[in-house]
Amino acid sequence: MAFRSALINVMTGAARKAARALVHDFGEIQQLQVSKKGPADFVYAAEKRSEQILIKELMFARPRYGTLSNELGAIEGADSSNRWIVNPLDGTLNFLHGIPHFCLTIALERDGEIFAGMTYDPLRDELFWAEKGAGAHLNHSRLRVSSRDRLENALVATGLPSPQHQGYVKLSKELDALTPLTAGVLRLGSTALDLAYVASGRFDGFWKRGLYPRDVAAGIILIREAGGFVGEVGGGSDFLSSGSILGANDKLYDRIAKTLENTANTAE
């Protein structure tokens, strides 16, 4: 059984408590499809409730830490070295439509670097967690990225912006270039779970732009501690600020990165 530090235990307790509220609300969503209030308002309320629980639990355990969250934004703590980054509901569109594929995430940023991360899928009871130097885990089992070294056997994931989004054309060209080289490209609707799936070897790679720190923070350390690589699409390592991320196993990262880079150069 994997050893969980006090820090991971704090994160686990907060995640499971907030997840209970999310699961309850998800059970109500189908009945709200015809309600006067509307399901979108209900999902927003569910996300806000989850965030409140996460912040309350984390701040009770570590009252001096700062926080970065959806509703409250950035709050400076007395301990300027440590900051929680939380995403109370990733996969909101899935949640809204009653699709059972969503999660919540918690990450700890220490001195500007992601030190620990957790992504919890409450419907499958899959808790992905990692701490710097302690490896990545799924519940009690150690995680490793996949060992696939041939792109034609690889399963890759991404996220699709709306056709009106400025990145839609660029992504369409990348899909045209990368899809024929792989076994397939999927879009499941939860960036945080996609990154966790790369860490667990279910996906061989993932890329997307237009993201927030809360979307990727936990996934960064999950992939790194599972033996994979993380960077920006097109190069660079400032993914928390740029909102651009590419994560993949150690054998295919360079090949995927080069394909995406060549696509961008051709488009220019």
Image: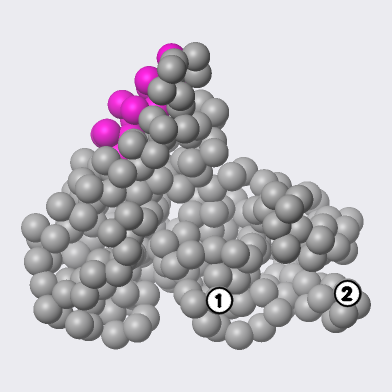
> Residue at left 63%, top 66%?
209
Number of marks in picture: 2
Most common SS among magenta residues: helix
Secondary structure of residue under mark 1: helix
Location of residue 137 by image quarter: bottom left
Left or right placement of residue 38 versus residue 183 in this view: left
Q: How many neighbours does mark 1 have within 10 angstroms: few (below 14), some (14-19), or many (20 or more)? A: some
- Badge 1 amino acid: Ser
Mark 2 lies on residue = 267
> Residue at left 22%, top 83%?
81
Q: How many neighbours does mark 2 have within 10 angstroms: few (below 14), some (14-19), or many (20 or more)? A: few
Give the vertical position of 265 relative to 62 (above or below).
below
- Badge 2 amino acid: Ala
Location of residue 32 by image quarter: top left
Left or right placement of residue 85 versus residue 66 in this view: right
Tag 1 and tag 2, C-beta contact below 8 Å? no
Mark 1 lies on residue = 242
Spot occupied by residue 230 in the image (x, y as percentages of width and height):
56, 74
Location of residue 48 by image quarter: top left
Spot occupied by residue 61 in the image (x, y as percentages of width and height):
10, 60
The residue lying toward the viewer, choosing from 43 and 209, is 43
Left or right placement of residue 188 versus residue 84 in this view: right
Left or right placement of residue 252 versus residue 68 in this view: right
> Residue at left 68%, top 53%?
161
Spot occupied by residue 45 in the image (x, y as percentages of width and height):
33, 36
Q: Is residue 214 visible?
A: yes
Q: Which is more N-terminal, label 2 or label 1?
A: 1
Secondary structure of residue under mark 2: helix
User: Does the segment drawn in magenta span residue 236?
Assistant: no
Magenta stretch: give its range.
19-31
User: Does the segment drawn in magenta span residue 25?
Assistant: yes
